[in-house]
Image (cartoon, helix red, strand yellow):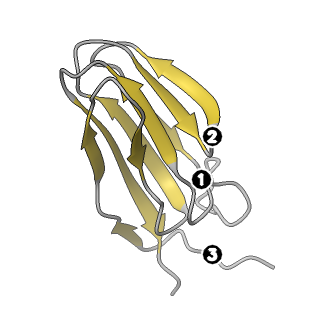
Amino acid sequence: MGINNSQRAACAPELIEAMTGANVVLGPLIANPTIIIFDNQSTTGVVLSWNNVQFKTFTGGEVMVLDMRAAHGLAANYTFSIGDVFTANGAANGDFSISYLYAVNL
């Protein structure tokens, strides 16, 4: 049976890098996210890949928030994995950021 981790959250360090027009590595994740925010802080599109698989193309200024708790506070079986790496590729005119919260074992 999974551990109920819904009562305490911790913030992981922000993963942020300037876009250069080439692949830029964001990661690895140090914990399993319960809520993760992908933030294209540039004015042009950024292609985001997850473990070498294209995940999503973000338009300039687009933000996406994923709540991995499935509306009940348990994330033990549905989340990104510790060690996952994201790669962003966009024009050299801004940053791309990944911020996330993770559950703390009580």
Q: Residue at x 52, y 44 (%)?
A: 67
Q: Is residue 42 above or below residue 65?
A: above
Q: Going by the picture, which residue comes out furthest to the left? A: 93
Disc 3 residue type (three-letter): Asn
**Are the two marked residues, 2 and 3, in contact with CB atoms closer than 8 angstroms?**
no
Q: Is residue 90 above or below residue 59?
A: below
Q: Residue at x 27, y 30 (%)?
A: 19
Q: In this orientation, does residue 63 appear? A: no
Q: Secondary structure at mark 3?
A: loop
Whether residue 99 sits left or right of residue 103 in the image: it is: left
Decide which of tag 3 and tag 1 comes sooner along the chain: 3
Instruction: Compare residues 52 and 45 and report the one nearer the observer.
Output: 52
Percent from the top left, x then y, of residue 22? 38, 28
Mark drawn on residue 52: 2
Whether residue 61 sits left or right of residue 106 in the image: it is: left
Mark 2 is surrounded, within 10 Å at the Cα level, by few (under 14), some (14 to 19) or many (20 or more) other residues, namely few
Q: Which residue is mark 3?
A: 4
Q: Which residue is mark 1?
A: 69
Instruction: Compare residues 65 and 71 and report the one nearer the observer.
Output: 65
Q: Going by the picture, which residue comes out furthest to the front? A: 22
Decide which of tag 2 and tag 3 comes sooner along the chain: 3
CA–CA distance between discs 2 and 3?
31 Å
Disc 1 residue type (three-letter): Arg
**Are the two marked residues, 3 and 1, in contact with CB atoms closer than 8 angstroms?**
no
